[in-house]
Image: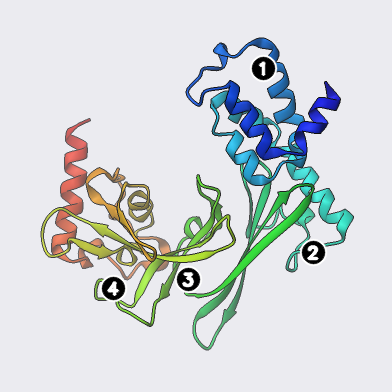
């Protein structure tokens, strides 16, 4: 058994093919023979240290039981990644991986095979920050990484600026920034999702909101920066459309919170009433429609 596990862990993509040939993506774990459950669960929980991070994420998609096994092995992968760093003598930025559990600019992927780090250096002359986003991940018994640097303006709550992994495994954070080469929705500065993708590429997506009626059919989400609760709700709504450089959310299924008119403490001079009338009316209408269905 152990010899077989060791052999299988050397070939993550081959293991996926092996598992998927025996297990349907929609199959309930109760339909899998017991002997295969024992092998799969043991390999996935304890033999996955040599899997690529990509392989771990792929195995978690097989079904909920597989994802559970992957999650239960997350701490083991985190420890393994840390030991690899110590063994190789590699350092990432100004922080060793041993410090990352307490460093507020870091985040571990939920499966433990990758860690993201965001470092910011302020520039008092421009009121912007030089932001470096890095991601390091397990790859066949070693550590690989990629990074990108942007100039970002911060006027957002920590919930938005703190790095996170999305469901695809991409590392991202939100900030205020500009695309000087073009205006969009009559503005230069936008709420932007800065992302470092798994393939090492990076992107900047300006975020907007579509409403049903009026002149503000698409408006920049940067207008909602003072309203933390409302902005969070809009970013959790469905995506109406997306291009390489933009993402537009739809107001029609946003879950508007009761405190949607409240400004955060750093924007006391701003009021919900300062928003354009047609935009206010659309948000109030969505909130009232939502309340009437309770």
Judging depth in this view, the residue of 161 and 207 nearest the camera is 207
Q: Which one is earlier in the sequence, the residue at label 3 or at label 1?
A: 1
In percent of width and height, residue 16 lies at 63, 33
Residue that mark 1 sits on: 37
User: How far is the residue under mark 3 from the one under mark 4?
Assistant: 20 Å
Q: Which one is earlier in the sequence, the residue at label 3 or at label 4?
A: 3
Residue that mark 3 sits on: 154
Judging depth in this view, the residue of 77 and 33 nearest the camera is 33
User: How far is the residue under mark 1 from the one under mark 2?
Assistant: 39 Å
In percent of width and height, residue 19 lies at 63, 26
**Residue at 32 percent of width and 47 percent of height:** 237
**Residue at 58 percent of width and 57 percent of height:** 199
Residue that mark 2 sits on: 91
Residue 259 showing in the rendered view: yes
User: How far is the residue under mark 3 from the one under mark 1?
Assistant: 49 Å
Q: Nearer the viewer, mark 1 or mark 2?
A: 1
| Element type at mark 1 | helix
Up the image or down, 187 lies above or below 193; here it is below
Horizontally, residue 15 falls left or right of residue 271, namely: right
Q: Quadrant of the N terminus?
A: top right
Characterize the local packing of mark 2: few (<14), some (14-19) or many (20 or more) Cα atoms within 10 angstroms.
few
Residue 132 showing in the rendered view: no
Q: Nearer the viewer, mark 3 or mark 2?
A: 2
Horizontally, residue 10 falls left or right of residue 107, namely: right
């Amino acid at each position: 058994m152990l010899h077989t596990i060791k052999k299988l862990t050397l070939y993550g993509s081959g293991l996926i093919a092996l598992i998927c040939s025996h297990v349907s993506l929609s199959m309930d774990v109760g339909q899998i023979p017991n002997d295969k459950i024992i092998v799969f669960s043991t390999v996935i929980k304890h033999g996955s240290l040599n899997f690529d991070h990509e392989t771990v994420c792929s195995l978690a998609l097989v079904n909920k039981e597989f994802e559970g096994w992957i999650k239960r092995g997350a701490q083991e992968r985190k420890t393994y990644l840390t030991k690899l760093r110590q063994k190789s003598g590699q350092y990432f930025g100004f922080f060793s991986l041993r410090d990352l559990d307490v460093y507020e600019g870091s985040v571990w992927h939920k499966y433990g095979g990758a860690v993201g780090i965001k470092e910011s250096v302020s520039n008092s002359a421009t009121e912007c920050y030089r932001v470096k986003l890095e991601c390091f991940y397990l790859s066949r018994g070693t550590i690989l990484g990629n990074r990108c640097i942007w100039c970002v303006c911060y006027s957002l709550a920590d919930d938005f600026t703190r790095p996170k992994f999305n469901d695809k495994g991409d590392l991202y954070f939100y900030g205020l920034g500009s695309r000087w080469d073009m205006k969009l929705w009559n503005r230069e500065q936008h709420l932007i999702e800065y992302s470092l993708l798994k393939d090492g590429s990076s992107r900047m997506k300006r975020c907007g909101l579509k409403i049903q009626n009026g002149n503000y059919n698409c408006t920049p989400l940067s207008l909602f920066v003072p309203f933390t609760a409302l902005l969070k709700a809009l970013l959790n709504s469905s995506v109406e459309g997306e291009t390489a450089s933009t993402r537009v959310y739809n107001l029609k299924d946003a879950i508007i919170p009761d405190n949607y008119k409240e400004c955060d403490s750093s924007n006391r001079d701003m009021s919900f009433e300062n928003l354009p009338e047609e935009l206010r009316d659309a948000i109030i209408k969505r909130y009232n429609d939502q309340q009437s269905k309770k």
